Amino acid sequence: MQRYLIQRLLLSIPTFIGVTIVVFVMVRAVPGDVADQLLGEYGAANPEAKAAILEKFSLNDNIAKQYITWLGELARFDLGTSIISGRGVWDELATRLPVTLELGVAAIIISLIIALPIGILSAIRQDTAADYLGRSVAVGALAIPNFWIAIVIITVASQWDPFGFDLKWAVPGDYTRFTADPIANLKFIFMPSLLLGAALAGSVMRFTRSSMLEVLRQDYIRTAWSKGLRERVIITQHALKNSLIPVVTVVGLQLPVLVGGSVIIETVYSIPGVGRYYILGINSLDYPVIQAIVVFAAFVVVFANILVDLLYSVLDPRIRYG
């Protein structure tokens, strides 16, 4: 196991270097100038101030020198300083990361609570009305964009009050941290988490159903039926654990989708997380912010893939890494 971890970590180094090259080049290929963004409408009329900004952040150097300098800072775990705000990117991420982490964890939990029972029910009631309904829900969750659903919900909830029910909790408001007011925090975070986890729920439903159907056709399950065991015992104690292995893969591989989805959901609901910070960085061409968040997202994806591989050995003792 230790040897396998070392190999995976070494193999991830070229991935990180490739990500840094791509994001560094693409950010600078975008039309516009961060100095003009910082100076606003006075940028073109004040060349001295623009030159001072470019000199301060070493943006006058050639792109190869800029990249090597930035890579050296990354090696020292220095994400740089925001050109627009003047604050350290680490400081900004430290305040925003817990918000995005809460949103992502809540999205995963909600999606699993919804998807696993529906997927299991669809498998054990194959080709029935419950199965068709569950499959339709899964397809809908995958097909309909979550940002569109969010806009519809916000529009309806802000203008419609059916039967006296208050739907204001479904519209954007002021974010309250869990430590300050747990109830207000959960009310605010529920709808964004539900929308963010919709696509994940659809994938988990489909994979749970197909995996459960495959396991239910195995000989040891037929033996359990022939022994007269109850359906609940067969499903929970024999079939469920083995059918969860592909589901773990889906959850791990969907983490990039959650990271990307958080950018949209945090923007729609005005959540002060990393995703919204990323959009602010793009709008202002804040190079250090954009680069830091993309590299951080790449780290999350690589770490998630390694974690999924390790969970394999827990769920299936036959799997061993040398």
Image: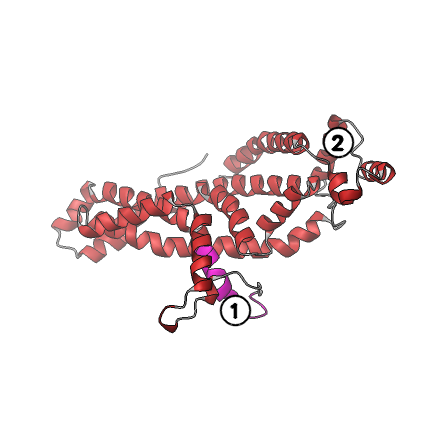
Q: Residue at x 77, y 49 (%)?
A: 86
Q: Is residue 102 left or right of residue 290?
A: left
Q: Which residue bears the numbered disc 1? A: 184
Residue 193 falls within the magenta-colored stretch = yes
| Residue at the far bottom in the pictured view | 164
- Report crowding for label 1: few under 14, some 14 to 19, many 20 or more residues within 10 A (C-alpha): some
Decide if residue 316 is in sight here.
no
Q: Which residue bears the numbered disc 2? A: 66
Q: Is residue 243 left or right of residue 82?
A: left
Q: Which residues are magenta?
A: 178-194
Q: Residue at x 37, y 68 (%)?
A: 162
Earlier sequence position, callout 1 versus callout 2: 2
Q: Secondary structure at mark 2?
A: helix
- Residue 274 in the image: state x and y as whole percent: 60, 50
Q: Is residue 316 left or right of residue 273?
A: left
Residue 136 — which label?
none
